[in-house]
Image (cartoon, grey):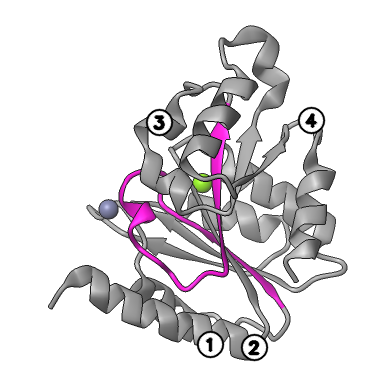
Amino acid sequence: MDILSENNRLAERNRGYFEGKQVLTLNMVSSPGSGKTTILEKTIRQLISAHKIFVIEGDQQTTRDAERIEKSGAPAIQINTGSGCHLDAKMIHNALKKMEVENDAILFIENVGNLVCPAMFDLGEQKRVVVISVTEGDDKPMKYPYMFQSSNLCIINKTDLLPYVDFSVESAIKYARELNPNLEFILMSAKTGDGMQGWYDWLEKQR
Ligand code: MG
Ligand code: ZN
């Protein structure tokens, strides 16, 4: 059977499950090292008093990120893909059997750091969030177009480092908009907290 059509079928089933429980599910994708886990730690600390938050962590090995997330106050389950380089809808379905996500919650899925095949695998999320950091090239959208075409929001992270790197925010946004005119952008530094409020406001708007 076609792997992607089977995945799409299971993704629709996940989506139905999330809709039934009014769970806002976000698929966070990026290259390794863009700061996804740090963004989630800060977000959880900020929002956990007012929201139910759950996290599914994807990495090839280790439970390090799930441990970091749990320390910030949200239940997390780690999926290790071994030699695999992306999460798929079936892995999410299986994780949901081990972690009961409450109604009206926000579920963050932190995908494996990889801008290539996670673009092809719908997990059943409502929104896809691609994170790039200013330590990467501002031409990332041109090099990995499918990820930017399939995302709803692009977070440009580590803006505190802008004075030290050759990253043009304008160029990155221009390249990404050429691929996906509907893509939204948020600039932030999860480290300093700069721009995080725009992200919290965006999250509220999705509910
Ligand atoms: Mg991580
Ligand atoms: Zn893959």
Residue 108 in the image: x percent, y percent? 60, 63
Determine the residue positioned at 53% across, 87% down.
Answer: 17
Amino acid at circle 4: Thr
Classify residue 1 as left or right of residue 67.
Answer: left
- Label 2 belongs to which residue? 21
Q: Is residue 132 magenta?
A: yes
Amino acid at circle 2: Lys
Foreground pick, 202 / 83: 202
Which tag, 4 or 2, sits closer to the chain's start? Answer: 2
Q: Is residue 34 visible?
A: no
Which tag, 3 or 4, sits closer to the chain's start? Answer: 3
Tag 2 secondary structure: loop
- In space, the residues marked 3 and 4 are separated at their CA atoms by 28 Å
Dot 3: few (<14), some (14–19), or many (≥20) neighbours within 10 Å? some
Q: Magenta region: which residues?
A: 105-133
- In space, the residues marked 3 and 2 are separated at their CA atoms by 37 Å
- Label 4 belongs to which residue? 192
Tag 1 secondary structure: helix
- In space, the residues marked 3 and 1 are separated at their CA atoms by 34 Å
Classify residue 70 as left or right of residue 180.
Answer: right
Dot 2: few (<14), some (14–19), or many (≥20) neighbours within 10 Å? some
Tag in front: 3 or 1 = 3
- Label 3 belongs to which residue? 142
Amino acid at circle 3: Met
Q: Is residue 56 visible?
A: yes
Label 1–label 2 contact, CB within 8 A: yes
Which tag, 1 or 4, sits closer to the chain's start? Answer: 1
> Which circle marks residue 17 in the picture?
1
Tag in front: 4 or 2 = 2
Classify residue 185 as left or right of residue 49.
Answer: left
Q: Looking at the figure, which quarter contains the C terminus?
A: bottom right
Q: Is residue 61 magenta?
A: no
